[in-house]
Amino acid sequence: MIAEIKAKWRKSVDNKNKKAVCTIALVAANIIVFLGLSFIGRTEDAEFMVQHGAMYDLYVVNGHQYYRMFTSLFLHFGVNHLFNNMVMLGVLGWTMELEIGKIRYLIIYFVSGLGGNMLSLCWNVLEGESVVSAGASGAIFGLVGAMLYMAIRNRGSVGNVSGRGLIFMVVLTLYYGLTSSGVDNLAHIGGLVAGFILAVLLYHPRRAHA
């Protein structure tokens, strides 16, 4: 017990002296892309966003423009969309990056984002729909899914974020998505599941030793 408390204290001190450089870089990249696009057009315009890399099922499937599943992770429809995602990314990403490390953090973030876009794409193709989508929310939900698993392994919390808080966040966000128009819920769900699975594979908490 004493060894575990000491280990947690040392980790807390170390984390206070560290910076989550990958999270900072991701937030900065999203903001820079948004500002750049805002200078030359309207980010709320679906056609404009498609011209600059947003997901569009017909172009991905028929035109083989698979890069859109990646570039769309850095695009946002308007300042509110950007702000909401960057606040979540900043809070969750900072905690998770310091907990799991830069490489595994980036793997979970990008693979979850791609997994969310893939699930959304497959569903739209099966339904015969053509949807324009963009945003980092699938990747961010991947962080939530990963942190849920990490909270389970750490007996209820990850850093300053509790497992109950994460569950509440997931339920609230999914409810908002299901009751609102223009929200890609399948990308959220796909990212959440992908993040959880990736954390199972990549996260192995260290045991404290005296």
Image (cartoon, grey):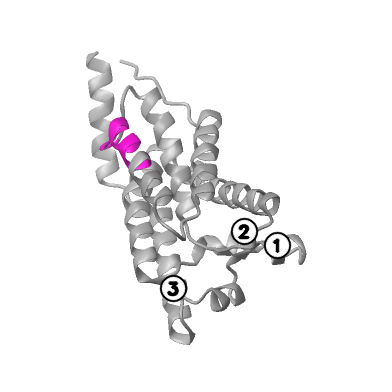
Which residue bears the numbered disc 3? 34
Which residue bears the numbered disc 2? 69
Query: Residue 60, which numbered label?
Result: 1
Task: Decide whether residue 163 is among the magenta residues.
Answer: yes
Q: Residues within 10 Å of mark 2 (few under 14, many from 20)?
A: many
Span highlighted in magenta in the image: 159-170
Q: What element carries label 2?
A: helix
Q: Where is residue 128 in the image (x, y as percent from the top left)?
A: 69, 56
Q: Residues within 10 Å of mark 1 (few under 14, many from 20)?
A: some
Residue contact at pointers 2 and 1, CB within 8 angstroms: yes
Query: Residue 3, which numbered label?
Result: none
Q: How crowded is mark 3: few (under 14 residues within 10 Å), some or many (20 or more)?
A: many
**108 and 113: which is toward the camera:** 113
Q: Where is residue 202 in the image (x, y as percent from the top left)?
A: 53, 32
Q: Is residue 37 above or below residue 13?
A: below
Q: Position of residue 165 (x, y in %)?
A: 28, 36
